[in-house]
Image (cartoon, rainbow, N blue to C red):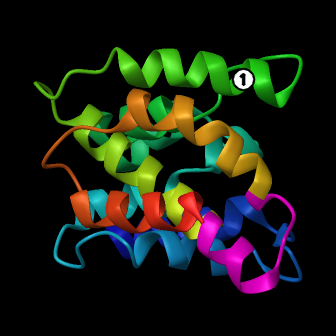
Amino acid sequence: MDADARAFAIEAHGAQTYGDAPYVTHLDAVAALVPPHDATLRAVAFLHDVLEDTAATHAQLLSRFGATVADAVELVTDPEGSNRRERKAKLHTRLAGLTLCTPAPPLALHVKVADRLANVRACVRSGDTRLAVYRREHDDFRPAAFRAGLCDPLWAELDALLSG
């Protein structure tokens, strides 16, 4: 399933780039932060930006990958908003309300922190000024997305990178 998700995401993102690199560079970085033996989690990692950044639809994901993957991708997708601050506030409210009693929320929360960590790592490596944005957002992002026992090593690294 994860190889199919990667192929779908590459096709959906088309010529989009992540900085100067093909967009798949970012997708691979996010997928590398989730357990390699969990194909469902890896599928969500590869697909995490398709609803937000491409013409792909929830219905397409549902048909091809099933409800758990489609719903998890939808949960990590920024809601509509007039600017980044508004979109992130809505997303953080959504994430804060998630419970771990159904399959999609833990997948979504794990991928969301993996995505954030991949972005922060890229900023640190390149000296990208967007690191300041992630630092400013962290005080709202962490309480919304953190769940004890769910990807704690990713949180430890993210916290360390953003505290410096």
Q: Which residue is mark 1?
A: 87
Looking at the rendering, in which quadrant would you find the N terminus?
A: bottom left
**Helix, strand, or loop for circle 1?**
helix
User: What range is drawn magenta here?
Assistant: 120-131
Looking at the image, which residue is at 72% across and 23% down?
A: 87
Question: Of 105 and 137, which appears nearest the observer?
Answer: 137
Q: Position of residue 42 (x, y in %)?
A: 34, 65
Q: Is residue 136 magenta?
A: no
Three-letter residue code for mark 1: Arg
Is the magenta region chiefly helix, strand or loop? helix
Question: Of 80 and 139, which appears nearest the observer?
Answer: 139
Q: Position of residue 28 (x, y in %)?
A: 53, 78
Q: Position of residue 118 (x, y in %)?
A: 56, 69
Q: Position of residue 86 (x, y in %)?
A: 76, 18
Question: Does residue 54 appear anywhere in the picture?
Answer: no
Looking at the image, which residue is at 34% across and 14% down?
A: 97
